[in-house]
Structure formats: structure tokens, C-alpha cells
Image: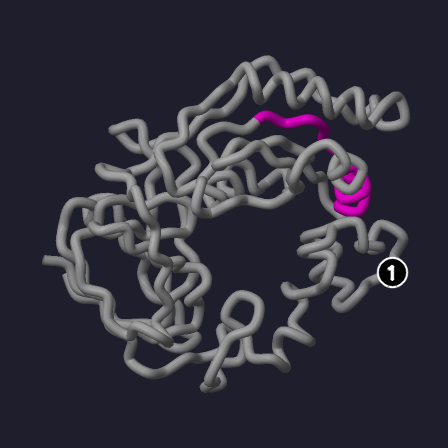
Amino acid sequence: MEWTGNLRKMNTELYMNSKGEVQYHLRGANVLEPLDALEMNEWVGKNLRIEFLNEIHCRSTGQRINKTFGEGLSYQAWMEDPASVPSVLRPELSRIHEGIALRDHEWEQKHHNQPHLLYISQTGNFKVGVTRSTNRPHRWHDQGAVGAVVIAEVPYRQLAGEMEVALKEVMSDKTNYRKMLTNVQVDVDELFDWREACFDQLGEQYEPFFLDETKAETFHYPVIQYPTKIKSVTLLKEPLIAARLTGIKGQYLIFDGGTVFNVRRHSGFRVRILTE
């Protein structure tokens, strides 16, 4: 297999594949023109070559750039693109439910004035997070979560963000990617213990939005060997990766010897990929 294009973050399917694993797809574009997605799980165990072709294109405008901001954007696009509005990273800032757009009214109505979930996921640690209801379970796949349970469902993003801020006093909202890339075993009991602690922290004010889910979602990833020591590489510093692919988890490719490559971080990078 040989593939040339500008990278985008990997996609996953809604349901597990026949092996009970998260099924990954490589997405990309010829600058801005979308390319057909490729199934990636079958690459695990094979030698993989990723060659940087010394071009980066803004995924919003197609402009050739020297470095990316956000997820594959030029600096100007990062400051102006609807999808990089500050309420993406800080949901509590959203005001579109009041009719006030921070950047783009139509985009924020479609993405932020929609039902959102407040959840706990187990990546390497246990963390709280916010996502649109329609992003379930893909958001957890992107994080490399081995398990997740929903705390509450709310009608708009700002309210979920407000609840998340209240929970930061008792638990993290960050993923430690190094821990995530180890062989983490899901602990469903602790997920539910954390959920109860979050109910207590939030209190009666938010109780109308609490969900009484009795089952956690658990996930398995196409990994045949986890790294003992991790070396994260970027194509700007190492323009050629050539090694045996031993797994895919979160948005990372895991290679023999502990090298890991964040695909999402390289959105817009033009590469040639070959499997042997």
C-alpha cells in the first residue's frame, strides 16, 4: 500500500470490529480535496514508512505554511476559523445559548447549542470531560480511553463546561498521553466511584441533568505490543519514520522500540505512507 496526501486526524467506527477492537481509518486530503479513507488496523504488525514531503497546508484555506496552530491551521485561520473558537477548549465560555456568538453564529448553533455530555473517562488516569452527545463514543476513542461513563446530559455546551469547572476541584480534565499509551486495564468500579463523587460535588443544583447509567462503555485497541519507554517524534524534527507498527491508540501510532507518532498533531502535513 502507498498513500500520499495531507494528514487529518484518524476516524473510528461506532462499533468495534470483528476482533472487538476500535476500528481506525486514515483520513486525508490532496491539500483540501478529501481522499478516500483507508482502514488501518490491518497495518498493525507490518513495517510502516511515513515520509514527510516538506509541505504543510492549512486545512482550512489550503495555504502553504511553515507551522501549524490548533489542528492544522495557519495562524490567521486559527484566529478566525469557527472551529477554533475559544469555547472549543473552554466550554464554559460559550454563550450561543443566549444568542451570542463568540466567532460564528451558524457554526456555534450547530456545534455548541446542542445536547452535550459530561463524562468521566479512564485513559491513563481518571478525568472529567465534555463532548457533544453525537460524539459518543468517538471522543473517547480519540483520548485512548479504556472506559467511560456519563455523569449528565445538558441542553447546551456552556452548562456542561460550567459543571466541568466545578469538578476540576476533585479530578483532572487532562489526559497524560504517556500513561494512556501503556497497557491500561479498565476499572469499572472506580469509574462509578468517581461518578458518585462527582454527583456529590455538583450537588442539587445540577441534579436534574444527572443520568442514571448502569453500564460503563469499555474499549479495546489494536495493539500487539505496548511501549516500555516512550519517545514522541514530530516530522519537523524527524522527517522519516520507518519501523514496525505495533499498535494504534488514541490519535497515536505506536512503533517498535517505543517511538510514538501523534497523527492529529500533524494535520495538514503532506506525507507519503507505505506498508510492507
Q: Quadrant of residue 206?
A: top right
**Looking at the rendering, in which quadrant would you find the C terminus?**
bottom left
| Region of the chain picked out in magenta, as a range | 149-163
Specify the amino acid type for callout 1: Ile
The residue that disc 1 covers is 100
Q: Residue at x 20, y 50 (%)?
A: 256
Q: Quadrant of residue 101?
A: bottom right
Counting from the top left corner in percent of width and height, residue 217 is at 50, 24
Counting from the top left corner in percent of width and height, residue 49 is at 19, 64
235 or 29: which is nearer to us? 235
12 or 50: which is nearer to us? 50
Decide whether residue 153 is among the magenta residues: yes
Whether residue 156 can be seen here = no
126 or 15: which is nearer to us? 126
Against 252, residue 170 (above or below) is above
Q: Residue at x 37, y 58 (%)?
A: 232
Q: Residue at x 55, y 14 (%)?
A: 189
